[in-house]
Image (tube, rainbow, N blue to C red):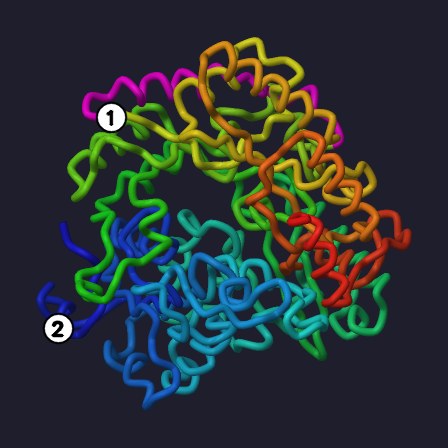
C-alpha cells in the first residue's frame, strides 16, 4: 500500500508528470479514515485523480512548501485540519496552548491561526489563476457570518476573508468528486455554482435570478443589530436540519455569499466505500523519528461505525458539520475493517472504540422517511424522543457481539459518548448491561453536562434526574456482576444561563453522589452553534428573550473552580 505523495520526489516515483489536485492541511498527514485530508485524498484518488497532500506547510519562510509541487491541473484544496485551529491553539480563557495533538511530538507552532485563510491567501497570491476550494470543520462552520470568540466580534463568511473560489461544507465524500468533475475541462464557475453543499460569492445579478432562496440579513446589519444576527441563525439552523433545504443568501457589502442546499443524506453503501478505501492507517514515513502523533495514537485501533448526530446539543458542532441524520455502515464493512486492523503494527487485540459522534446511534433513523423529509427539528431526542425515531438498540448490540467474536480480538472498549437519554427509561434490550459487562475499561464516561434545569434547557440536554437514574442502574449492575467500576460524568461551566449559584448547586449535588470529577470544561463558544449566538448576543435566538452570559474571565474561572472544591 502507498501513501499519497507529499513531495516532488514521491510524485516522480509514481511516474506522474502532473498533479490534478493538491491538498493543503494544518494537520500532519496520517493516512487514516479519521483524518479529513486523507479521506478526501483517497476519495478523489478512487475517482481517478492524481492527488498529493502537503501537510503543515511552513507559512513563515520563503513559501517553498506552497511552491514545491507546482500548479495542479484542477485545483488546490485547503483544510485547517480535524479541529478548528482556534480551539486547537487556545484554552477557553484564550491562553495559548503549548501542544498540538495533530503534530508529531505533540509540538505546537506548526500551523497558523485560521490556516484556511492563511493558506488560501498564499496560494491565491502565488497561483492567481488556479481555483482554491476550502473545506473541513473550520471552513464549514464559518461559511456565513459568525461570532468569533477569539476576536470577540461578528466575522463575515470565511469566503470573504480567504478569497477562496468555493467552499465545500460538511463531509466532502460525495461533493469533492463533483467539484473535480466540474473543473475537469477548466475553471467554470457556472458549473461550480450548481453543486449542492457548496458555497461561493456571487453578484446581485446572479442572486436576482436564483430561485428557491432565503435571503438573510446582511453581514453589516448583523454586526450592528444582535436581533438580526439571531434571526439569521434560526434560519441557518432550520435549513441545515432539513433533508431538502433551500439556498441561503447573505449580503456582504456589494456581494452575496450563496450557500447551496445540502447534497442529501449519504447511503450506508456510500459510507462503506469511503471506509474501505486503501488507507495504510499509518502516519506518513516522513514522521519517523519525530515523535508520536497523539491524535493518531488515540484512534489508531478504533473503528467508526456511523456519521451524524441527532442530539442537537446547543454547544456542539457535530450536527452543523456532519448533519443531523445518522448514516450507518454495514456490519460487513465494520467487521472487515476490524480484520484489517489485526494486521496493523502493535495491534494486541484491543480496540479503543467502536463508535462515532455518539456511541449508540448506530442504525437509528426515522420509521417514516416522509415525516423526516418534512421535519426541521434540531434534535430528534430533545425535549423528548421523536415518536417517529426508531431508537431500538438491538442493531448496535448485535454489531458489538459480532465484533467481539472476531478471532484475535480480545477486548473492545466503547470510547465514544453514550446518549443514555435514549434508553434509560426503556432499556428492554439491556444496552447498559451490555456496555458495562463487555465494553467498559473500568470507567464509564457520560456527559450530563450540568445539574440545573435552567442551564440544561439552554444546552438542549435532558434532566439531571435521568443521570441519577443511570447512576443507580450502573451501581446495581456493577454489584450484580461484581465489577469494581466507576462512572465518570462530564460537566461544563460558564455556559449561557449558568450563574455561579448554579455551579454551587452542581457541586453540592455531585458531592452527594460521591462522583469523581475528571471530565470538566469551561465553555468555549465555537462558530455556528446555538450556544455561541447566545454568548455573543445575550439572547435566545428563537424567543429573543434575554439570557445571562458570564463573560468576565475571573468569574468564569470561579465557576470552574466549583469542580474542584
**Residue indicated by mark 1:** 409
Residue 385 part of the magenta-drawn span: yes
Q: How far apart are marks 2 and 1 (CA)?
A: 39 Å
Residue count near mark 2 (Cα–Cα under 10 Å), binned few <14, some 14–19, many ≥20 = few
Q: Is 85 above or below relative to 118?
A: above
Q: Are marks 2 and 1 in contact (CB under 8 Å)?
A: no
- Where disc 2 sits, the SS reads helix
Residue count near mark 1 (Cα–Cα under 10 Å), binned few <14, some 14–19, many ≥20 = some
Residue in the picture at 63% in, 59% down: 526
| Of residues 535 and 52, the one drawn nearer to the viewer in this rendering | 535
Q: Position of residue 252 (x, y in %)?
A: 70, 74
**Residue indicated by mark 2:** 9
Residue 51: give its label. none
Residue in the picture at 79% in, 65% down: 217
Q: Quadrant of residue 151?
A: bottom right
- Give the magenta range: 383-409
| Number of the front mark, 2 or 1 | 1
Q: Position of residue 321 (x, y in %)?
A: 55, 50
Drawn side of residue 16 relative to residue 498, left or right? left
Residue 341 part of the magenta-drawn span: no
Q: Is 133 above or below relative to 403?
A: below
Amino acid at each position: 500500500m502507498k501513501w499519497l505523495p507529499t513531495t516532488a520526489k514521491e510524485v516522480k516515483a509514481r511516474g506522474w508528470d502532473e498533479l490534478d489536485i493538491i491538498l493543503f492541511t494544518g494537520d500532519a498527514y496520517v493516512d487514516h479514515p479519521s483524518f479529513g485530508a486523507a479521506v478526501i485524498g483517497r476519495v478523489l484518488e478512487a475517482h481517478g485523480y492524481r492527488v498529493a497532500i502537503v501537510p503543515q506547510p511552513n507559512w513563515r519562510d520563503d513559501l517553498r512548501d506552497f511552491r514545491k509541487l507546482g500548479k495542479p491541473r484542477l485545483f488546490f484544496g485547503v483544510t485547517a485540519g480535524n479541529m478548528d485551529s482556534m480551539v486547537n491553539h487556545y484554552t477557553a480563557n484564550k491562553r495559548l496552548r503549548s501542544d498540538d495533538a495533530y503534530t508529531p511530538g505533540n509540538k505546537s507552532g506548526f500551523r497558523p491561526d485560521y490556516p484556511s485563510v492563511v493558506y488560501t491567501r498564499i496560494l491565491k497570491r502565488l497561483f492567481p489563476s488556479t481555483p482554491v476550494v476550502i473545506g473541513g470543520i473550520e471552513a464549514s462552520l464559518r461559511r456565513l457570518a459568525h461570532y468569533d470568540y477569539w476576536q470577540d466580534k461578528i466575522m463575515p463568511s470565511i469566503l470573504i476573508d480567504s478569497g477562496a473560489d468555493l467552499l465545500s461544507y460538511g463531509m466532502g465524500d460525495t461533493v469533492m468528486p463533483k467539484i473535480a468533475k466540474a473543473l475537469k475541462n477548466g475553471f467554470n464557475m457556472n458549473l461550480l455554482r450548481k453543486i449542492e453543499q457548496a458555497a461561493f460569492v456571487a453578484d446581485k445579478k446572479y442572486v436576482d435570478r436564483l430561485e428557491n432562496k432565503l435571503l438573510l440579513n446582511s453581514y453589516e446589519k448583523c454586526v450592528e443589530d444582535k436581533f438580526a444576527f439571531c434571526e439569521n441563525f434560526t434560519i441557518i439552523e432550520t435549513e441545515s436540519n432539513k433533508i431538502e433545504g433551500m439556498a441561503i443568501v447573505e449580503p456582504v457589502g456589494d456581494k452575496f455569499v450563496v450557500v447551496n442546499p445540502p447534497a442529501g443524506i449519504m447511503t450506508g453503501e456510500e459510507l462503506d466505500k469511503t471506509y474501505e478505501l486503501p488507507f495504510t492507517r499509518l502516519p506518513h514515513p516522513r514522521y519517523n523519528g519525530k515523535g508520536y502523533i497523539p491524535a493518531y495514537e488515540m484512534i489508531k485501533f478504533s473503528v467508526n461505525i456511523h456519521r451524524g448526530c441527532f442530539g442537537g446539543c446547543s454547544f456542539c458542532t457535530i450536527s452543523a458539520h456532519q448533519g443531523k441524520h445518522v448514516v450507518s455502515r454495514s456490519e460487513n464493512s465494520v467487521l472487515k475493517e476490524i480484520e484489517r486492523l489485526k494486521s496493523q503494527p502493535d495491534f494486541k487485540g484491543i480496540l479503543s472504540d467502536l463508535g462515532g459522534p455518539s456511541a449508540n446511534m448506530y442504525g437509528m433513523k426515522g420509521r417514516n422517511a416522509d415525516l423526516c423529509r418534512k421535519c426541521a427539528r434540531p434534535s430528534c431526542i430533545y425535549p423528548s424522543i421523536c415518536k417517529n425515531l426508531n431508537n431500538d438498540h438491538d442493531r448496535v448490540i448485535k454489531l458489538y457481539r459480532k465484533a467481539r467474536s472476531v478471532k484475535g480480538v480480545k477486548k473492545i472498549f466503547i470510547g465514544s459518548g453514550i446518549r443514555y437519554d435514549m434508553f434509560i427509561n426503556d432499556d428492554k434490550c439491556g444496552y447498559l448491561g451490555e456496555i458495562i459487562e463487555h465494553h467498559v475499561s473500568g470507567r464509564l464516561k457520560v456527559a450530563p453536562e450540568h445539574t440545573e434545569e435552567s442551564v440544561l434547557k439552554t444546552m438542549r440536554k435532558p434532566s439531571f434526574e435521568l443521570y441519577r437514574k443511570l447512576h443507580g442502574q450502573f451501581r446495581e449492575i456493577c454489584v450484580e456482576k461484581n465489577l469494581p467500576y466507576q462512572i465518570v460524568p462530564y460537566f461544563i461551566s460558564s455556559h449561557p444561563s449558568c450563574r455561579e449559584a448554579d455551579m454551587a448547586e452542581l457541586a453540592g449535588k455531585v458531592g452527594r453522589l460521591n462522583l469523581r470529577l475528571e471530565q470538566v470544561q469551561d465553555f468555549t463558544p465555537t462558530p455556528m452553534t446555538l450556544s455561541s449566538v447566545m454568548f455573543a448576543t445575550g439572547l435566545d435566538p428563537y424567543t429573543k428573550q434575554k439570557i445571562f452570559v458570564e463573560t468576565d474571565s475571573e468569574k468564569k474561572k470561579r465557576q470552574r473552580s466549583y469542580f474542584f472544591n
